[in-house]
Image (cartoon, rainbow, N blue to C red):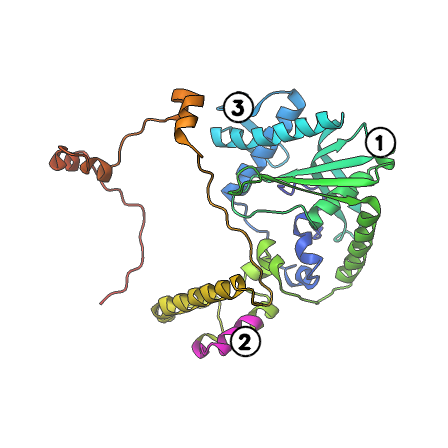
Amino acid sequence: MSDKTTQPKHSRLSPSKACIWMQCPGMIALTKDLPPDESSKYAAEGTLAHALLEKCLKDGTQPDQHIGEEIADTDKGLTGEVTEDMALAVRYATDWVRTRAEQCAGKIITERKVDIVPGIGKEFGIQGTTDITIVSAIDDTLIVADYKHGAGVAVSATENDQMYLYAYGILADKVLGSAVATCSNIEMTIIQPRINLPNKHSTTTITRDELLMFIERVKQRQKEIAAGSTELHDGTWCKKGFCRARKENICPLLRKNTEDGLKMVGAAALVKIPNASALDGSALARVLDVKKAVVDFFEACEERALKLAEDGQNVPGYSLKEAWGNREWKDEDVVLATFGDIATKKAVLSPAQLEKVKGVDKAKVAELTEKKLKGYKLEKTK
């Protein structure tokens, strides 16, 4: 979810980063003096997709009805156009939410701002905004869903600290009060329509007691962080959680582990890794000279580790995970028979494709083509 929180300006325990600070409390102290991370165009697109999702669920409209219209997030001061790609992704989310609400005769609540855990001082309170809440009318289940517009990293709802925090925030919501007081089961779903996997959402269910036990661990971490904990631990959360300390190359633990690994493979020249921004042209040239050899070596190690894992051998800290390709038609003739012309799209052949067509005048193709400068790349001089 775009972390549209109501946190005070100086609060540092963001629910979206809970996967990091719950495992590595020292990260908070390590990154406290870094300037705010720059927002990307992808984050902005995700924020607007959230705004479209909220609008459709409130208005009862479909996302594709808004293609070409301007959508805005007034809290963040963002505006943009609803694209076909955005509408398609949000349509998956709206369909899922409406279907799930119908199944349990539940009421849909969008973008609910919640106070999750009170602060220790003004820097360490935990607040957030849940994308979707559904309170079932036919059983004792609370349903909390989070929409993620990103297409790069698949996120699971299982043992997801961010989702646990949002769910507890709803349970602790004083306004909702009696509506959630009897909920003993918590169903949490992450909806990620643009991810390149067969399943576009991930769901897990825990009990209220399990959630309360998790919150006790959160409160203990909160105390440790407020006391200035410098305890660091590396793991999958470093990369998946987009840790600033990792990104800015300031984590001493990751640096030590990298240096130890380089010593093991005999890359002595790289053991003391500097920041790239500190290198001049000559130093950069020396690094680039060995890049291919180093990359080839690590790729060979990766292939070797995969083979060992496939053969059932242990590679500590790593496990096999299914790699799915893009969806393919089972039978294109059946697709055409079912959907007709709407299943096909006419497109102009590329110059290279057209030149391969029998009888085409390649000279005429050359007259009608051009090459555009897209940028530059470094090339080793002889």
Q: Earlier in the sequence, mark 3 or mark 1?
A: 3
- 67 relative to 130 in the view: left or right: left
Question: Which residue, given by chain and number where applicable, does mark 2 sit on?
Answer: 260
> In terms of secondary structure, where does tag 1 sit?
helix
> Which residue has dot 1 on it?
179
Q: Do the residues labelled 2 and 3 touch (CB within 8 Å)?
A: no
Residue closer to the observer: 92 or 290: 92
Mark 1: few/some/many CA within 10 Å (<14, 14-19, 20+): some
Label located before the other in sequence (2 or 3): 3
Q: Which residue type carries mark 2?
A: Asp
Q: How far apart are marks 3 and 1 (CA)?
A: 33 Å
* Residue occupying image coordinates x 58% and y 37%: 47
Q: Residue at x 74, y 40 (%)?
A: 187
Secondary structure mainly formed by the magenta segment? helix
Q: Position of residue 325 (x, y in %)?
A: 47, 45
Residue drawn at point x = 49 percent, y = 74 percent: 262
The image quadrant that residue 368 belongs to is top left
Mark 1: amino acid: Ala
**Residue 233 drawn at (x, y percent):** 66, 66
The tag on residue 64 is 3
Q: Tell me, yes or no, whether the highlighted magenta stretch contains residue 23.
A: no
Magenta highlight range:
257-269
Q: Assess whether residue 262 is covered by the magenta stretch.
A: yes
Of residues 55 and 362, which is closer to you in this image? 362
Q: What residue type is labelled 3?
A: Asp
Above-or-below relation of 43 to 298: above
